[in-house]
Each structure stands twice: as C-alpha cells, then as structure tokens.
Image: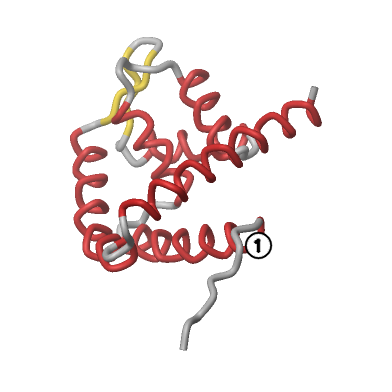
C-alpha cells in the first residue's frame, strides 16, 4: 500500500511549525527560558558584531513578526537573568547565556536527529527551496499590508 503525501500548503506548513516549536518549547521550559528569549539570545550570540538593543529587536521582529514591545520584554528578561549584559551602547551575551544555548542545543540534538533523520537530501533541498520562496512571498505580502 502506498501512502500519498499531501501537497504542501499553509496548513501543512503550520502543523509542522507548531509541532516542532512545541518540542522546542518543552525543552526550553526545562531550562527556564521562553521561545522569544531563546531567539533573542541566539541572535545576540551568533551576531557578527555586538548589537544595540534597537538593532537586536529589529532583527528579531523581522524573523518572528512579533510585537516589538514583547521582544523588548524578552531582551529585558535576558538582561535581568544575566544572560545578556549591556556594554556601552551594545548588548553582549554572558558566559551564562552561551552556556544556556549550549545546553539547549545538547538537549535538542537527539530530538532533531530523530525528527529529521532519514529524510532524503533531495527532499530536504526541495522543501528548503519551497519554504524560502514562501517566506519571501509572505514577507512581501506583509510589507504591502503594513506599508
């Protein structure tokens, strides 16, 4: 018996996103961090150069499309938890912030391997191309709606 996979659409994309995010949020909760906090901390850690709070919030807003006030609250929580620190006009991740991200990565690695393992590389490449195009088009639509 052959099972036909459904065509990719907004519903399928949303179901995959929320399933994966649910797993991540469960792991993040064990570490006492929220999804927006993790996104902000990761952005600060992986930045090529230290960012101002405004730059970091703008970057995260571009990714999550979340309310900038909510993103600012997540950044403030990271500062209060000493996972980020203020250095002049810039934010820098602390050693504790880097260690937290490493611990989360270690906890998510086996789950990620189970979820993504065994998917043929050509399928992942095709999905990546489609998702990149959907993201580009949706960002353009959102920009038109908010202009």
Against 55, is 110 above or below?
Answer: below
Q: Residue at x 19, y 55 (%)?
A: 106
Q: Residue at x 39, y 38 (%)?
A: 78
Against 70, is 33 above or below?
Answer: below
Q: Quadrant of residue 37?
A: top left
Against 94, is 147 above or below?
Answer: above
Query: Can you give x and y, in whole percent of width and height, for residue 93 in the image?
Result: 28, 29
Query: Can you give x and y, in whole percent of width and height, for residue 141 in the image?
Result: 74, 33
Q: Residue furthest front?
A: 1
Instruction: Choose between 71 and 108: the one closer to the eye.
Output: 108
Say which element carries label 1: helix
Query: Can you give x and y, in whole percent of width and height, for residue 56 in the image?
Result: 46, 24
Instruction: Choose between 126 and 110: the one closer to the eye.
Output: 126
Side of 136 relative to 108 (left or right): right
Q: Quadrant of residue 42?
A: top left
Q: Residue at x 35, y 56 (%)?
A: 32
Against 67, is 15 above or below?
Answer: below
Instruction: Choose between 141 and 109: the one closer to the eye.
Output: 141
Colour scheme in use: secondary structure
Q: Mark 1 — residue?
A: 11
């Amino acid at each position: 018996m052959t099972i036909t996979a459904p065509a990719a659409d907004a519903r399928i994309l949303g179901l995959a996103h929320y399933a994966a995010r649910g797993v991540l949020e469960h792991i993040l909760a064990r570490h006492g961090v929220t999804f927006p906090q993790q996104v902000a901390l990761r952005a600060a850690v992986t930045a090529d150069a230290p960012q101002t709070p405004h730059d970091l919030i703008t970057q995260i807003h571009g990714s999550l499309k979340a309310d900038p006030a909510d993103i600012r609250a997540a950044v403030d929580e990271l500062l209060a938890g000493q996972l980020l620190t203020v250095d002049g006009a810039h934010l820098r991740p602390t050693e504790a912030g880097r260690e937290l991200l490493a611990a989360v990565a270690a906890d998510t690695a086996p789950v990620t391997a189970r979820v993504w393992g065994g998917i043929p590389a050509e399928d992942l490449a095709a999905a990546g191309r489609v998702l990149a195009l959907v993201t580009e088009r949706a960002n353009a639509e959102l920009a038109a709606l908010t202009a």
